Amino acid sequence: MKNQENFQFTIEAGKSERHYWMDLWRYRELFYILAWRDIAVRYKQTIIGLLWAIIRPLLTMIIFVVVFGKIAKLPSEGIPYPIFVFAALLPWTFFANAFADASNSLISNSNLISKVYFPRLIIPAASVIVSAVDFMISFIILLALMAWYHYLPSWYLLTLPLFLLLGFFASLGAGLFVASLNVKYRDFRFIIPFIVQLGLYISPVGFSSTIVPEQYQLFYYLNPMVAVIDGFRWAISGGNTAFNTTELSLSISVITLFFLVGVIYFRKIEKTFVDVI
Amino acid sequence: MGIAIKVENISKKYIIQHEKKSAHYETLSDSLIQGSKNIITRISHPFSHSKIEQQTQEEFWALKDINFEIEQGDRLGIIGRNGAGKSTLLKILSRITEPTSGKVHINGRIASLLEVGTGFHPELTGRENIFLNGAILGMSRAEVKTKFDEIVAFAEIEKFLDTPVKRYSSGMYVRLAFAVAAHLEPDILIVDEVLAVGDAQFQKKCLGKMEEVSKSRGRTVLFVSHQMGAIAQFCNKALLLDKGMIAQSGTVSHIINYYMNMSANNMSGFQAETTSRYKDIAIMKACSYDAEGCPAVNFVHNQEIVIEIICKINKWISGTEVRVAVRDSKRNVFTTDTELIMQNEAVSNELCAKVVIPAGVLRPEQYFFKLAIYLPNQLIFDLVDDALSITVVDGGSKYAASEGLDYGCVFVDCKWAINPSSNLIF
């Protein structure tokens, strides 16, 4: 791409695509530092920051155990109910936080976006990393919980990163899509908590996906988080809970579709962010 | 020297939404606000068609067919009124927004300094923000590390390195922000109005640093400012934008003069109301002129300012004086007066009093003129507060770099003598 004057770089109307993916790599340090900033700010502002990452899933777990385990007496597929719930809460909380943060990330970084160039994809991606750190902290609680119940993990646990990765792409895909909508139509930020709350009840967090009637199972698997949650339980329980390849492959397909649509839409809207934000 | 930036036919279009009833808005920002209001109403009431029907879309060309080249090592000042397209141009050059059409060829790494402290996070410490801000401006971590001590020394914040920047004074904040940016080593630096904030001494330091960077290392600088003095002192070339187009480009002094004349549009001066005619002696008209006799309200500090006052004499009283009091926004600067002398009473009942304020006296500021006709210690015939107002801008005086600093009311060309001292004290 060199012309007679040897210009290193050319800005041309409608031709930014070519540089984009290259830039994404070139700006990776900015990605690290933005992720680090979000983490530092989150755990610096208050002591609650750290406690919050522990208290929230713990309290939710207790409520779910009481409501679903003790009152509704739902089956827990042979593992202690607290572990059963917590194993599902881990990926769900990760997804919910990552999705909500990614969705709001563009708005909260609008001062950056309107003043400096970098591939905008960095911002929602970096915000998902913060939720991953929260996840790590919660994971330690899970380990403590398992020790408390003398529940030994097996080699199945090694598959966990795979499901985490699925959750990562699910939240980033959905987050990118909503983030771009959020820039254009600010009212979307009111919808995000609603989506998250609704998702908590339609995903098998407090109960087992086996209680869903068989004829509806395939339909239920369309929720990509079902396979992620079931996968987590499966990995943690050492293969003792229900998990099948149908839901896994369906989930992978749906997440891939989500992610692609998210990225494509984000890229399409990205060029006008500055003019709108 | 090669070419650093080559801009070819750049245009940028914005779509503005209007409500039909109020046909035109005063500013672009008004229009944009209205536009966003409409979007919100459309979302919150998606089924109310009446509102949408009132809207019209209008294209607004923020930039139209811009062509220019900047050579490496040039310091280009970009001036123009608000809304002339300066910021849009810089945004395109720094890739924040895409042009609607056209091409820009860039040779080298660009860094822009659009607003002080962009990306600073108030909760993080000065140390952390240096790394954060550096990364945002395009520096690598290793690069920030090697320049870290230099940045801290330049910003003069050693003691507060580990304090969150939310506890910084605004001066410290600006200093830190500029220090990071100044140590960035781009081939092309874009600066937009940063120097509007911060204390004057620091501004001077910043300009010095920018000049040094540009001169010694052949860096190209693009500088947008409303301070003509800063532009005159710092830039070697200038570009004047008007309504999205290049009005003029060339040497700095030429562009500044051109701009001054362009913006001088309400030069009718003072015009008395009809009731004044019945006074014994009345001020009928007053106007300010430049040395060539053209009406002007904007002056460069080294231009003469001519004030002309037309008086109508209904009843002549000898010993009458005319006075001009000059004040700036804070206080009276000086007063000058003279006796009105009727040379030929029979012929004329109108007198023209002309006063010249010498070049290089008034420092850059806006001035107001109070005019009076009176008989000393006895009677005031006519008095007009703020009859005229003029603006003096710095066209590159010695004090240009300290614009905003209080270095006195007026420039005075004092005589100095420096000689070897003959008085040995010891």
Image (tube, rainbow, N blue to C red):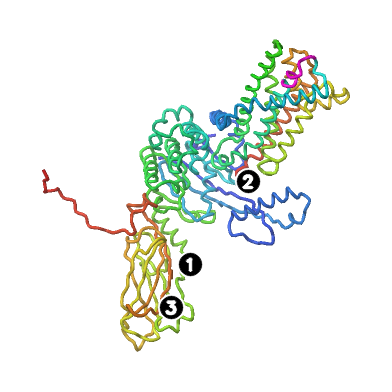
At x 41% / y 36%, what residue is drawn?
A: B157
Q: Give the distance between the C-alpha atoms of the residues marked 1 and 3, in whole angstroms.
A: 18 Å
Residue picked out by circle 1: B266
Q: Nearer the viewer, residue A177 or B422?
A: B422
Q: Give the distance between the C-alpha atoms of the residues marked 3 and 2, in whole angstroms.
A: 52 Å
Graded by Cα atoms within 10 Å as few (under 14), some (14 to 19) or many (20 or more), the crowding at tag 3 reads: many
Graded by Cα atoms within 10 Å as few (under 14), some (14 to 19) or many (20 or more), the crowding at tag 1 reads: few
Q: Nearer the viewer, residue B49 or A204?
A: A204
| Host chain of mark 1 | B
Q: Position of residue A91 (x, y in %)?
A: 70, 24
Q: Which residues are magenta?
A: A78-86
Element marked by disc 2: helix
| Host chain of mark 3 | B
Element marked by disc 1: loop
Q: Is residue B303 above or below residue A241?
A: below
Residue picked out by circle 2: A276
Q: Position of residue A267 (x, y in %)?
A: 65, 37
Q: Is residue A24 visible?
A: no
Dividing the picture into quarters, in which one does residue B343 lie?
bottom left
| Host chain of mark 2 | A
